[in-house]
Amino acid sequence: MDVRSLLLFSALLRVLLIIYGEWQDAHMEVRYTDVDYLVFSDAASLVASGKSPYQRSTYRYSPLLAFLLVPNSIIHPSWGKFLFSASDLLVGLFIHTILELRKVPENLCACALMVWLFNPFTFSIGTRGNCEPIVCAMILWIIICLMNGKVLQAAFWYGLVVHFRIYPIIYSIPIILVLDPHCFRYGLKPALSSWVGQGNSTQSIPSTAVPDSCGIWIALTSMFTRARILFGLISGAVFFAFTGLFFYLYRWEFLHEALLYHLTRTDPRHNFSIYFYHIYLHYEHEFSVVERLISFLPQFLVQLVLIICFAQDLPFCFFAQTVAFVAFNKVITAQYFVWFFCLLPLILPWSNMKLKWTGLSCILLWMGTQTHWLTWGYLLEFKGKNVFLELWIASILFLAANTFVLIKIIRYHTYSPLFQRLEFSSSDNDLREGKKSI
Amino acid sequence: MESWQHVQVHICRILGIQLIFLVGFGFCMSSSFVSCEVGRCTSNVGSTNQSLNIPPYFEKYITKSYFDKYDSLLDSDFLDFISHELFPGSCELLLDNLNLVLRLSVQQRSLIGDGSHRHLSSSFRFNIQSELIAELPIHFCEAIIIEKLPYGIFADPFELQHLLQRGVFMDAAVFGDTNLELPSVHSNRSLVEVHMDVDLNTFSRHKDGLEINIDLPLHIRYPPLEESGYSSIELGAPDLFMRCSIEAKSHNQSCLLMLKDNGVALGNGPVVWRVPSGIKAHARAVSIVTFISAILSTLSIVLTSVYYSSTKLCKNLKQS
């Protein structure tokens, strides 16, 4: 099946699901539509009538999302679902673009694409009205911009996506590191390392190799390249510009609901995180600074090590960081999984993991521990049984499954830096591998 | 393939331009937004009368003015509010007559469902003296049911809005603490006001009298920790009112009547909601095991990453 057919079929599937969702909402007690979609829609209708979207309680997103959904009140309430599903398809297109740029064979591209397009979790999330596909599309577009050497564009979208959803801030250091002067020259299209078959790594030596003691000063000063400085400045400026604009419009309500809430969020209600029961049992007293630091330390350490080890293999670094970020977060809801599902197809062509039986065992273990957790969650929430302890143990098992799967993925991954090392002559005019970028 | 790439670039440029357009559009729309004072906003279903000078019995929601005056729901304050602020002098004659005509005979309440999401089913029956009711200059009546929810129980205002759209209630609003996410320890009480349409003339022809049935969806917050692992929350009886629009000489007037239970006990006893709660004795063990699990996972990932990245680095160096 070629890519165009896959995308067309996926689009049709999503349209049918949206139509079915409307029918289910109108005729059944249990809605198909996500509760969050109703929150976005209410906020959008408030914006349409000239009011603050934060008058809608539990609206904790950028006002941009409410603006995007204003047509819900003007055209049709399903506008947002079509927008999110279109973003979902755009993610598929971008996955194909990235793999094509890295010269992955067409059959592998198609298989990787199907992992995203036909993942039941993926196609239900957009059609139910969840906005995560927009974030995923922006992140993949940032990767494409970097691959095409378009630093300014990448910086703009990066500043915007961090404003929209804070979690992509974890990608800032890998992006800065990948703009290595040995591989990336501002104004020139970088040379991408191509797919060379599973099990074979590329010829490129990662430029995170430790410099000798005499060159440390040179290494430190060479960290501040034009590309890196511009990326940092532009993305920071875009982030603060949007934040400043919405602060001007909506004041502290915006700052608290859209930004500060997410930075300080602890939820005692049951969720996949191992911390939920600990938080509930200690909710009557405030956590001390030491307790907060201790709970942040695993997350910080894992992120740091993954960045140091894999930054040059940017898609893989993003994927591993996102899996770890979600697994160690204080609150985990199912919609967070789509953050790494969109990156999974980018690393599959470089994985030596066979579906039988390592791959299958990872899938079954991950889904099995999730189902196990959901069973106890159902008994607690819908049957009123005191199963807090069992549910918490289930969340520990889910963390163990996430850790196991991540370890397996790292073990079977063929390390492949995104950019090839440039070969320079004494003159800058004599670049052998660079191409002009716009 | 090139034209396909151009299409992709074109799509992305259009998306970028649309995004900028929407920001500008949103900026224009927001230029006249209504500010909402944090902490005082309630997610009322339906619009509310903004004037502070209108007596509570004339307002769309009779309990709204209570929350304009008080920050939280206390039974003693609410009783004072009912006694002193809800009943005007001018309707006394009508109210005395209505009191004779309408008497609460039966009320039944039960909690339907299991778990954290249930329905409070309430049924009220009134005896009506049909020969007297025809003499009263009543234009229109509505029953107002006030559920004062205890700590730990809340109603979702957006769920009520959905029910309104389906015509289940004539009107409904939630006042007080409408934060749906906080546990009991950090939340305050809330109150639900439900309006049901009542046609006294139609019901006066019924021998059984007037019956009002309400099915209110309610949810539970995480309760405080208990040694037993369960917390019991009792739901008190609601306050019932009848508000009628009467024909006066110059204009129609609203009169509010509180329907007392006349000593009628609840048909099936008080309503108690048994909720699972965390057990304090678990705290230490849970904290220790949680952090050990996090540390073990961290170490596994860190060691794997360092080992395999250095292995791959050596392999790359050998190949080059």
Image (tube, coloured by chain):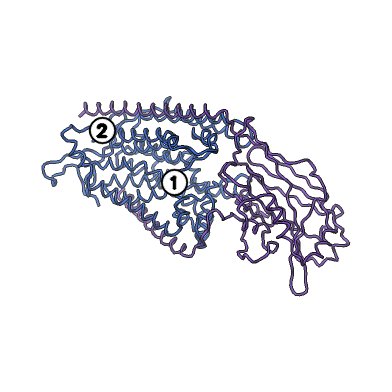
Say which quarter of the image contains residue B300. top left
Foreground pick, A424 / A245: A245
User: In what element is the residue under mark 1?
Assistant: helix
What's the residue type where badge 2 is placed? Answer: Thr
Foreground pick, A150 / B113: B113
Q: Report the disc number at residue A388.
A: none
Q: Is residue A190 visible?
A: yes
Is the residue B132 above or below the residue B223 in the image? below
- Between marks 2 and 1 in the image, the one whose residue lies nearer the viewer: 1
Residue B21: percent from left, percent from top = 40, 60
Q: Dot 1, crowdedness within 10 Å: few (<14), some or many (≥20)? A: many
User: In what element is the residue under mark 2?
Assistant: loop
**Chain whose colour in the figure is purple:** B
Q: Where is mark 1, residue-wise? A: A133
Identify the mark nearer the N-term, 2 or 1: 1
Q: Disc 2: which chain?
A: A
Residues behind callouts 2 and 1 on a single chain: yes
Is the residue A94 above or below the residue B289 in the image? below
What's the residue type where badge 1 is placed? Answer: Pro
User: Residue most toward the bottom?
Assistant: B250
Q: Where is mark 2, residue-wise? A: A202
Q: Colour of chain A?
A: blue
- Which residue is found at the position 44% from the left and 64% from the top? B28
